Amino acid sequence: MPTFALIPGAGGSAWFWHRVTPLLEATGATAIPIELPAGDDTADLNTYADVVVEAVADAPGPLVLVGQSMGGFTAPIVATRVPTALIVLVNAMVPMAGESGGQWWEDTGQQAARIEYFQRIGLPREDFDEVEDFFHDVPEAVRDEALRQPEPQQSDTPFEEPWPLDAWPDVETRVIAGADDRLFPLEFQRRVVRERLGLEVVAMPGGHLVALSRPQELADLLIEFADF
């Protein structure tokens, strides 16, 4: 059975995966939710990768790296350091060689794509509301629990330095996109993933935080992809 290393996005909280982890483990797989030192200004992307490598050092079974959102910058670095059977990106940023996390937003045209999506679905604003637009499809009890967590801290350090790889690693990669993601709209993700990886996304219901809003559907897709 595979081992899933579950890499969170900005804020670096392993709690993000708490609804998915038991569903994966119920199938006999190993699930390792990663806690990243997101609030540490001395921690860069290589540090994040070091944390993941250490966490999976004794992991059994084929390794599947799952990168959520900003985790798309970290997962491929890890894949160059440890034997990896599969990378799965979930509503993730897909970097290019030499591109920083800060540059990614402008390079991809994310803001214009998001505003156009807001207009298309009838949202009467252009600004992103971190509570409403991240949690719009998350069950109320889960949202309330999330908002009771310590406020996530995210250092700018990983966004300031260029992505350290020359190219995407030669590892099978699958990409999941939430059909209702308000941060990275589906058509935006389709374009970026085609341009940068030459791949098609697999769309599933849900917004940006599908691990919280649609854990069973996400776990089912992960298990399906990892049927080696």
Image: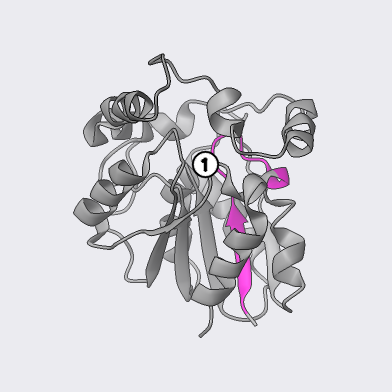
Q: Is residue 154 above or below residue 124?
A: below
Q: Is residue 91 above or below residue 219?
A: above
Q: Residue at x 67, y 44 (%)?
A: 16
Q: Residue at x 29, y 42 (%)?
A: 188
Q: Is residue 77 above or below residue 152?
A: below
Q: Residue at x 63, y 38 (%)?
A: 37
Identify the image quadrant of the N terminus: bottom right
Q: Residue at x 45, y 65 (%)?
A: 87
Which amino acid, by three-letter code, is at mark 1? Gly
Percent position (x, y) of residue 208? Answer: 51, 41
Q: Which residue is mark 1?
A: 207
Lateral position of residue 48 relative to residue 142, left or right: left
Is residue 86 in the magenta section?
no
User: Is 214 or 77 nearer to us in this picture?
Assistant: 214
Is residue 14 in the magenta section?
yes
Percent position (x, y) of residue 44? Answer: 49, 38
User: Is 204 or 155 nearer to us in this picture?
Assistant: 204
Query: Tag 1: Cα neighbours inside 10 Å, few (<14), some, or many (≥20)?
Result: many
Percent position (x, y) of residue 173? Answer: 38, 67
Task: Say which element carries label 1.
Answer: loop
Lateral position of residue 54 relative to residue 93, left or right: right
Residue farthest to the front, as pictured? 122
Identify the magenta region: 2-15
